[in-house]
Image (cartoon, rainbow, N blue to C red):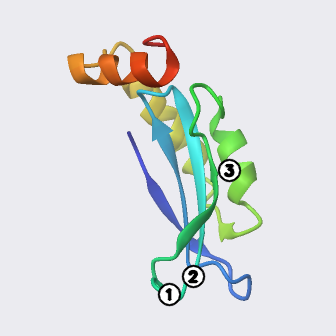
Amino acid sequence: MSRYELKPRAGNGVVKVAVGWDRPLQTFFAQVFTPTNEEPEEGEATIWVGTEPGELPSPEAALRVVEAYADVPETLATALAADMAASIGVRDGVHQAEAKKRLFGSTH
């Protein structure tokens, strides 16, 4: 799994933005956090896409989710693609495979 935190754009009420690659789910993900009374600096993920297997199939799909909320470095899509490529051939451990069976009905 990889995770990159991006600098939120000023004035949009966002405290944190993250994107990354989730190898077990075989998807990229995107998160946008807004402040809460309990956690004003960490916030709560009010947008969280990429929680289902294969939901965001490309780095560009994940970056489209967050581009309105954060500054996206030009090299980030390439870095995310490299993270995915580096995980090719990595297999789930016993516990990961069992969790996938329970959650999704299969190990894929």
Name which residue type carries label 1: Pro
Mark earlier in primary sequence (1, 3): 1
Tally the marks: 3
* Left or right, residue 20 beside residue 68: left
- The picture places residue 90, in percent across and down from the top left corner, at 31, 17
The 10 Å Cα crowd at callout 3, few under 14, some 14 to 19, many 20 or more, is many
Name which residue type carries label 2: Pro
The 10 Å Cα crowd at callout 2, few under 14, some 14 to 19, many 20 or more, is some
Q: CA distance from mark 1 to mark 3?
A: 24 Å
In the rendered image of this protein, does residue 65 appear above or below residue 92?
below
- Name the residue that disc number 3 marks: 63
Under tag 2, what secondary structure?
loop
Q: CA distance from mark 1 to mark 2?
A: 4 Å
* Residue found 45% across the figure and 36% down from its top: 22
Residues at discs 1 and 2 in contact (Cβ within 8 Å): yes
Q: Residue 87 appears in which quarter of the rendering?
A: top left
Mark earlier in primary sequence (3, 2): 2
* Left or right, residue 70 beside residue 76: right
* Residue found 55% across the figure and 82% down from its top: 36
Q: CA distance from mark 3 to mark 2?
A: 21 Å
Q: Which mark is residue 40?
A: 1
Mark earlier in primary sequence (1, 2): 2
* Residue found 56% across the figure and 31% down from its top: 27
The 10 Å Cα crowd at callout 1, few under 14, some 14 to 19, many 20 or more, is few
- The picture places residue 105, in percent across and down from the top left corner, at 49, 13
| Residue mark closest to the camera, 3 vs 2 | 2
Q: Which mark is residue 75?
A: none
